[in-house]
Amino acid sequence: MDATTMTRLWWGRTGSAQKSSPAISSNNVAYIGGQDSYFWVYDANSGKQLENLGKFAGAFQSSPALAYGKVYCGNWDGKLYCFKAGTPTSISCWVDRQTATLGDTVYVRGAISPSVGGATVTISYRTPDFTVLNRTVTTSSDGAYEDAFTPDVIGPYAAFASWTGTATYGRSSSTSSAYVAPAIFEVKAAEGTGVTATTTNVAVSPTSVAVGKQVTITGSISPAVAGVQVSLQIVKPDTSTITRAVSTASDGSFTDKFALDAAGTWSVTAGWAGNAAFSASRSNSVTFTATTTEQAGAGAAAGISNEVIATIVAAIAIIIVVIVGVLLLRRKK
């Protein structure tokens, strides 16, 4: 904002809350890390996002420090990072189609900006069962790249592009904004193949527990597909992920119990890779929370529900109001 008039000049959206202040370099570049575990770089004059250094193992809650052309910042993963302040870059990623038939070739394209020729770009494909397949390509003289990918499984895919940078140019990732979708496409079975489309659903119970307690994850594949592996992708409050595998019962259902080891909001998504008779599918993401022991309170430890506690508190408040009212009436008499 303008420090005199307090007029907003620009704003940039990151993927989460910010608990630290940015550091501004002498050439007007703003550096800041976020709760989403990404580290962001902005043009301090225009607000244009110049670079995203990618996702780290933990959240950034301290402000960066700048010295001698380098950026220093601590992270909740227990490490102190040092980055060389090269020319920031961005990398794009898109696909030539959003829907493909099994056996078709999907072309994933993009470019590094400013143009960097001869750079190695890693394209990470997230398959329907959350398996990640990494492929590398080399950029042409104008910084552009292309990868011809032939999916071998039916279902939803996502592609992300990244490169590690050089001594002159900073690294970047196509996940430069949590609010810009990666290259996403759907692979379907060809007509007449007899492959049945499926849907996967998932639920969590209870939706709020104390840290250290278990939640039960349930779901099913419909139509029922028995004896197949379902992948559960669990995202922790610090945005790190855990993948667990469960098998379906004869009715296509699955169950898993999981203990929460950190306070905050969690989420889970279920997916499976499909087979020759049934297509792959992925569920919507379901959120749930873990509270600290203090938040849960002695009532929860004793097995008293929050609703019961609220009722008791309300009853005590009513009794206090009645007593105060009686005392005031007596004083008037």
Image (cartoon, rainbow, N blue to C red):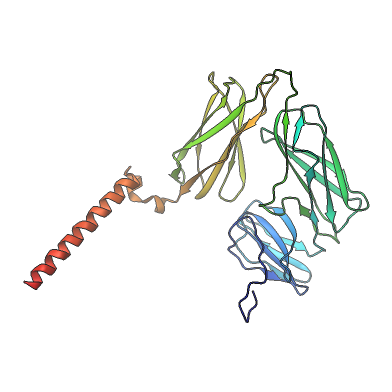
Farthest-out residue, front: 191
Count the marks: how many?
A: 0
x and y, in percent, of residue 275 in the image = 68, 22
Query: Residue 302: x and y, percent?
Result: 32, 44
**As drawn, is 218 to the left or to the right of 194?**
left
Q: Is residue 95 above or below residue 20?
A: above
Tell me residue 123's x, y (percent).
79, 43
Is 1 drawn above or below residue 319 in the view shown?
A: below
In the rendered view, does 215 fall on the left or right side of 305? Answer: right
Residue at the (75%, 50%) spot, across then down:
174
Could you say which quadrant of the image residue 322 lies in?
bottom left
Q: Quadrant of residue 14?
A: bottom right
Which quadrant, please, contains the N terminus? bottom right
Quarter holding the C terminus? Answer: bottom left
Residue 185 position in % (x across, y down): 73, 37
Name the residue nearer the viewer: 314 or 295: 314
Extreme residue in the left direction? 333
Residue closest to the far bottom: 4
Nearer the observer, 174 or 243: 174
Q: Residue at x 68, y 33 (%)?
A: 128
For this orientation, the residue located farthest to the right is 141
What residue is at 66 percent from the left and 32 percent from the top?
A: 129
Report the side of 297 relative to 277 (left or right).
Answer: left
Indicate whether 49 appears above or below 281. Answer: below
